[in-house]
Amino acid sequence: MKLHYRELGTGQPLIILHGLFGFSDNWQSHAKKLSEYYRVILVDLRNHGHSPWSDEFSYNLMAQDVFELCQSLSLKNLILVGHSMGGKVAMNFAQNHGELVEKLVVVDIGIKQYPMHHEYILAGIHSVDLPTISARRQAESQLSAHIDSEGIKQFLLKNLYWKEKGVLAWRMNVAVLEREMETILSAVDDVDVTVPTLFIRGAMSNYILDDDIEAIEELFFDAEFITIDNAGHWVHAEASQVFLEHLLSFCLR
């Protein structure tokens, strides 16, 4: 699949993969800073953002999409950064195409299977009655019935766009993503990775627990772990400056 992407800067390629319900815009401010050092490539994964939709959905397919992008742009010696679902895509890519990856950064996601925990987000998405609303504030009001977090609401609202005058639509393929939630939450394949890997987690997040670290180290032979205080699952947004400092410290050495 030919993915939508955009580039900033020059030099060694650094690819950023967003998380579930996200798209490349979520990383725009980080990309501007990183582009001072790298050729930053912001990617929309399949069924997200401006990339095509497909009924076929798996981590192997998403990693293959990224591989095809690397081939089309003749990328190698790349730094691969992925958050949450994008982190699992990045890990799968390193398992299958490690020869292309110089360094891997996985943001607040582990290798284990996760229990379902997106029910309230899906309920909020389904509560937005697209055929009847004509303004974003109406969608925000409907989301508020299910979602308290202002950050999550604004994150989801970025996915709304004007399909035509007076008609709002989602950029994400909600039907497929909901259907494939078990796949999205599944464990990473049991394939060893020798690529130097940095796992960055938020201290207030429960996605990578202390008890998870030993299993991660058994799969990722050259793994490091950084915990950022006062940050949750969206650690890159909640502690942006500290996150960038740790990311660049790892990538530039």
Image (spheres, helix red, strand yellow):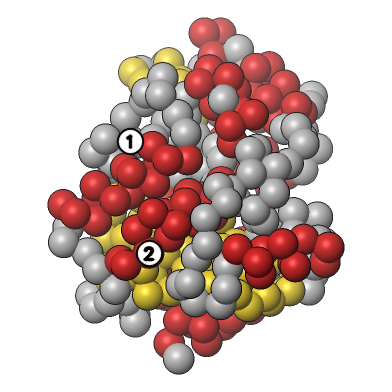
The image quarter in which residue 38 lies: bottom left
Q: Is residue 75 above or below residue 121?
A: below
Q: Quadrant of the N terminus?
A: top left
Tell me which residue sits at (24%, 38%) in the image.
2
Q: Residues within 10 Å of mark 2 (few under 14, many from 20)?
A: some
Task: Give the alpha-carbon distance from disc 1 to disc 2, as whole Å.
Answer: 24 Å
Can residue 77 be seen here?
yes
Q: Secondary structure at mark 1?
A: loop
Give the camera-side residue of 73 and 195: 195
Q: Quadrant of residue 245?
A: bottom right
Disc nearer the start of the sequence (1/2) = 1
Q: Badge 2 is on which residue?
A: 98
Task: Pick the residue in front: 27 or 151.
Answer: 27
The structure residue drawn at horizontal position 72% and vertical position 21%, both measured from the top left corner, is 123
Direction bottom: furthest residue: 253
Relative vertical location of residue 124 with respect to residue 210 in this rendering, above or below: above
Residue shown at the point (51%, 83%) measured from the top left: 250
Disc 2 element:
helix
Q: Position of residue 173 (x, y in %)?
A: 47, 24
- Left or right of 34 on screen, residue 18: right
Q: Which residue is mark 1?
A: 51
How packed mark 1 is, by other alpha carbons closer than 10 Å (few <14, some 14-19, many 20 or more), is some
Q: Nearer the viewer, residue 102 or 251?
A: 102
Q: Residue at x 52, y 43 (%)?
A: 22
Q: Are marks 1 and 2 in contact (CB under 8 Å)?
A: no
